[in-house]
Each structure stands twice: as structure tokens, then as C-alpha cells.
Image (cartoon, rainbow, N blue to C red):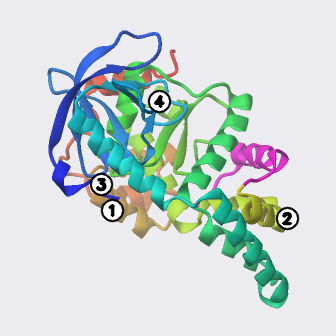
Amino acid sequence: MTALKQYEKLEASGLWRESPAMQRREVYVGFGDTSLMIRNQKDEVLSHWSLPAVQRLNPGKEPALYSPTPDASETLELSDETMVEAIEQVRAAINRRRPHPGRLRLWILLAISVVIGSLGFFWLPGALERHTVRVVPFETRKQIGGEILGHITKLTGAQCSTSSGNRALIKLKTRLQADVRSRILVLGDGIAKSAHLPGGYILLNKVLVEDHEQVEVAAGYVLLEQLRAKASDPLAQLLQHAGGLEAFRLLTTGKISTDALRDYAEFVLTQIDPMPANEALLARFKTVGFASSPLAYAIDISGETTLTLIEADPYRAQAYTPLLSDTDWVGLQGICGS
């Protein structure tokens, strides 16, 4: 989705609060193609909001109050009528595209009738799961991923979060050319080095930022998970683990049972997906623009099993734009408060 053409390069001032415990700060808000960019008076980026996810907290009231997602702690207060009108037009367009519950239920009933009339097709092994994966929208995937994350954090502890660390993760995501809808999160011990969930969630074990001197190691694991998620749809992985009954439940109700999600969360904690092909991984490093050797040595300190990532490192003897500033890297290393 792109923003409305008449609002290109639109900017306005507003009041931004990073969390309920923080004071409001005067900021400048830029209306971009797919996002709102929030900067301070020094033109430093404070936050980056995806336009499709922006929520209005006080409909019909002024000044308008927004948050980046329903469960976010950030808020943005806007009085500029043109900026508010632009955001509301985008939100209205998104709402029009979302299925209406009544129509969705009718469509599901019709679909069930078709299923009953053509069991020979839908009940072939794996057919139902593949069909469900094709039709489930991103917002539902994000909700499912968030529920799985909730079960994971009950076992690992809450996700790590500090102001400087969160800003560093946003900058790293942008530098790695990740989908604006995705989220990179750092968790405590209890998970494998990295993992991914439906809805664009990428999880990193805190050791990747605390026990290494280079941000390239954590960034390399993000690229690994991006390629793994591209090679095998995370929702398909979940349904294969949960079984056909859960696929049918998701298709007809838009939900998966709590027990199935809890079981999958425990599976994710120990599951280690296969390495992507070296050619695909090296191409991704070259496109994003940083060295693959730090990841290779983090996976195998001897370098024997990751020799290709070392010898074919696209930036082995070539400088590249740093992934983060020293200040941001220090902030990321301290995101778990240690």
C-alpha cells in the first residue's frame, strides 16, 4: 500500500510519548509512502510507524491521538488538520479492504458447502493446510504470531526492551531492508539462537547481542530467518505441526486453539531450521551490504562447516556502510538491561 499522492512529503509537528512513563516531546512527523517517520528537532529518527498498522485511540476527538499498533506504548498527538486528514484517509481505505464479519461468515458457510460437495479435493493429504495458508490475511498471521510469542515469553521471560535498544532494532531493521511490517525482538535464554513466527516476527537470543563484539552476527541471524521464512511459510509450518483439525478451525473461525499454539511455542524454543543454501545467503549479504564472515564464525568458530561463507564473503576485503553507529550498537547490547 502506498500513501495518497496529494500528501507526498507532508510534514507536521506533534507531541510524541515513547511510553506512559515518559514526558511528551515535540516532534516532526513525516508522511511517507508506507510509513510515518517521527523525528526530533535535531532531525534524528525517533520512531518509524507502518501506516497500515496505525491506530486512532480517540475517534472523533481533538487533538487526534494515535499509536503504532493496538498494544504499543508509544502515542502521537496531532493537531494539524491536513496530517490528520491524510492519516484518516489511509485508515479508511484499509478498513474498506478488510472483510466485514457478516460477509466473511457468509463466505465461510458457502465455502464449507463447496468443501462438503468436493471432499475428494479438499481432504487429500495436505490440501486443506495449503488452501488455508493461501487465504489467511497478514493481520490474522500477525495475531497468531503474537499469541505464540506470548506463550514463548512465559517460558523465557519478557522480551528485552530499552529505549535505546528499541531504537537500534528499528534502525537495524531498516538497514537490513526488512519488511516494514516485520518486527525484530530480543529474548532471554531459552530459545535457539534465532527463530521466526507467522506475522513477520524474528526472534533473537540475547547472546547474539551480548556475547559478540560485532552487530554483524545478530544481523546475519536476521538474514537467516528471513530466508528460512521465505523458503517455508511460517504459517504452513505451524499448521503442519498442529494438524488438519487446526487448519480447518483456522479456515472457518480465523483462530487456532490455545493448546495448539502453546505446543508450537514449546516446539519453536528448541527447533533449529536447516541452513539456507550458501548461494542464496551470500546473495542476500551482497544485496543488503555487509560481511558474511562474522556469521560464519559465530555458527562454527573453526570455520570448517561454514567455509563457503568465509571464502566467498562479498565484503571480505571491501568496506561497507556500518549497520549501526557505535552508540546504537551499545544501546542494542544493553537492551536486556545487563
**Eye-nearest disc, 2 or 1:** 2
**Eye-nearest disc, 4 or 3:** 4
Please name the residue that numbered disc 4 is placed on: 57
The residues bearing labels 3 and 1 have C-alpha atoms spaced at a distance of 15 Å
Query: How many neighbours does mark 3 have within 10 angstroms: few (below 14), some (14-19), or many (20 or more)?
Result: some
Disc 4 residue type (three-letter): Leu
Residue 288 marker: 3
The residues bearing labels 2 and 3 have C-alpha atoms spaced at a distance of 40 Å
Disc 1 residue type (three-letter): Ala
Mark 3, secondary structure of its residue: helix
Q: Left or right: where does residue 298 sit relative to residue 238?
A: left
**Which sits earlier in the primary sequence, circle 4 or circle 3?**
4
Magenta residues (range) = 255-274
- State the quadrant of the N terminus: bottom left
Q: Is residue 270 magenta?
A: yes
Disc 3 residue type (three-letter): Val
**Which sits earlier in the primary sequence, circle 3 or circle 1?**
3
**Residue at image coords 21%, 38%:** 82
Please name the residue that numbered disc 1 is placed on: 312
Query: How many neighbours does mark 4 have within 10 angstroms: few (below 14), some (14-19), or many (20 or more)?
Result: some
> Principal SS element in the magenta part?
helix
Q: Left or right: where does residue 6 sit relative to residue 187?
A: left
**Residue at image coords 68%, 42%:** 147
**Which sits earlier in the primary sequence, circle 2 or circle 3?**
2
The residues bearing labels 4 and 2 have C-alpha atoms spaced at a distance of 37 Å
Residue 88 marker: none
**Residue at image coords 40%, 69%:** 279
- The vertical placement of 16 against 119, above or below, is above
